[in-house]
């Protein structure tokens, strides 16, 4: 597959995802995906042939990676019309338009967009910081991706509760400092946290990300996974991170 099969607009570029030769259309002046999206796509429990939905899909990186891991079909919800358009064109360019559906809409209006209880897996890489928490970018599109300008943590969990099947899973990447809020919100929504992994930039550093997955209607009982280290002492990716990029499924 060549880049000529991707319909690009002014200023856009094509980025390689490495896995399954997937490619992604992005614009350098707007929010671009980073390692957290890749980590979430590989952390989430994917059942081959199952259905998944990505809340706040951006340009579609997580959805594409879930398809590479075996999901039969993925739906992406994105409030930013330009990002949603790029995700659509990325799906087309990768030959996956029949399996990756993009809906331009607000997850807070999810009941108007989709029927409830239809997905085995819900994932989200949501804005990490509440409004008032830290510097907010003057670029509105970037601010929406980093701060809870359009959807709060509670909004994300509420949408997940509505969409996920009974005994289905909800996985999210977020900040360790908000773990208490996250677990309270999930439990209140009937999604019991079952797996947790802290991500460390390097040995001896504090964790800067967490990966958490819950099951709707499950009994209490949390499995804390071994820490995930991103960089070695020489600044290169750790073996655990490199394994992600060597996986086809």
Image (tube, rainbow, N blue to C red):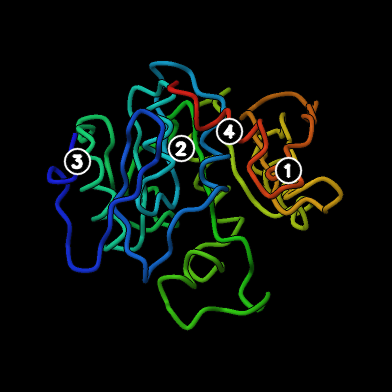
Q: Earlier in the sequence, mark 4 or mark 3?
A: 3
User: Residue 242, which numbered label?
Assistant: 4
Residue lying at 72% horizontally and 29% vertically, measured from the top left: 194
Q: Earlier in the sequence, mark 4 or mark 1?
A: 1
Q: Which of marks 3 and 1 is nearer the N terminus?
A: 3
Regarding residue 154, the answer to whether it shows in the image is: yes
User: Of residues 140 and 65, which is closer to you in this image?
Assistant: 65
Q: In this view, does 244 lie to the left or right of 49?
A: right
Disc 4, SS: helix
Q: Which of marks 1 and 2 is nearer the N terminus?
A: 2
- Distance in Å between CA atoms under marks 4 and 1: 11 Å
Disc 1, SS: loop
Residue lying at 57% horizontally and 39% vertically, measured from the top left: 39
- The reply to whether dot 4 and dot 1 touch (C-beta < 8 Å) is no
Q: Where is residue 88 in the image (x, y as percent from the top left)?
A: 23, 47
Provide the residue designation for mark 3. 93
User: Residue 148, which numbered label?
Assistant: none
Q: Which of marks 2 and 4 is in front?
A: 4
Q: Which of marks 4 and 3 is in front?
A: 4
- Kindly give the residue lying farthest to the bottom in the view shown: 138
- Distance in Å between CA atoms under marks 3 and 1: 35 Å
Crowding near the residue tagged with mark 4, few <14, some 14–19, many ≥20 C-alpha atoms within 10 Å: few
User: Of residues 74 and 13, which is closer to you in this image?
Assistant: 13
User: Of residues 4 and 218, which is closer to you in this image?
Assistant: 4
- Kindly give the residue lying farthest to the top in the view shown: 48
Provide the residue designation for mark 1. 232
Provide the residue designation for mark 2. 163
- Distance in Å between CA atoms under marks 4 and 3: 26 Å
Q: Which of marks 2 and 3 is in front?
A: 3
Disc 2, SS: helix
- Distance in Å between CA atoms under marks 2 and 3: 28 Å
Crowding near the residue tagged with mark 2, few <14, some 14–19, many ≥20 C-alpha atoms within 10 Å: many
């Amino acid at each position: 597959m060549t880049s000529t099969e991707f319909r690009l607009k002014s200023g856009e570029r094509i980025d390689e995802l490495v896995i399954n030769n997937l490619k992604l259309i992005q614009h350098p002046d707007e929010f671009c995906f980073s390692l957290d999206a890749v980590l979430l796509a590989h952390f989430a429990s994917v059942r081959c042939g199952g259905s998944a939905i990505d809340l706040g899909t951006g340009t579609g990186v997580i959805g594409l990676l879930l398809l590479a891991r075996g999901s039969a079909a993925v739906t992406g919800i994105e409030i930013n019309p330009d990002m949603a358009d790029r995700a659509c064109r990325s799906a087309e360019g990768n030959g996956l338009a029949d399996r990756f559906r993009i809906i331009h809409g607000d997850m807070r209006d999810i009941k108007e967009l989709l029927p409830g209880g239809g997905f085995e897996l819900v994932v989200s890489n949501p804005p990490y910081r509440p409004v008032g928490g830290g510097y907010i970018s003057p670029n509105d599109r970037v601010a929406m991706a980093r701060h809870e300008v359009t959807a709060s943590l509670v909004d994300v969990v509420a949408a997940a509760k509505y969409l996920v099947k009974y005994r289905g899973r909800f996985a999210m990447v977020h900040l360790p400092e908000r773990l208490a809020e996250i677990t309270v919100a999930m439990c209140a929504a009937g999604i019991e946290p079952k797996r947790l992994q802290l991500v460390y930039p390097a040995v001896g550093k504090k964790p800067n990300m967490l990966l958490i997955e819950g099951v709707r209607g499950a009994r209490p009982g949390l499995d804390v996974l071994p820490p995930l280290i991103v960089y070695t002492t020489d600044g290169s990716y750790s073996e655990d991170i490199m394994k992600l990029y060597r996986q086809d499924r």
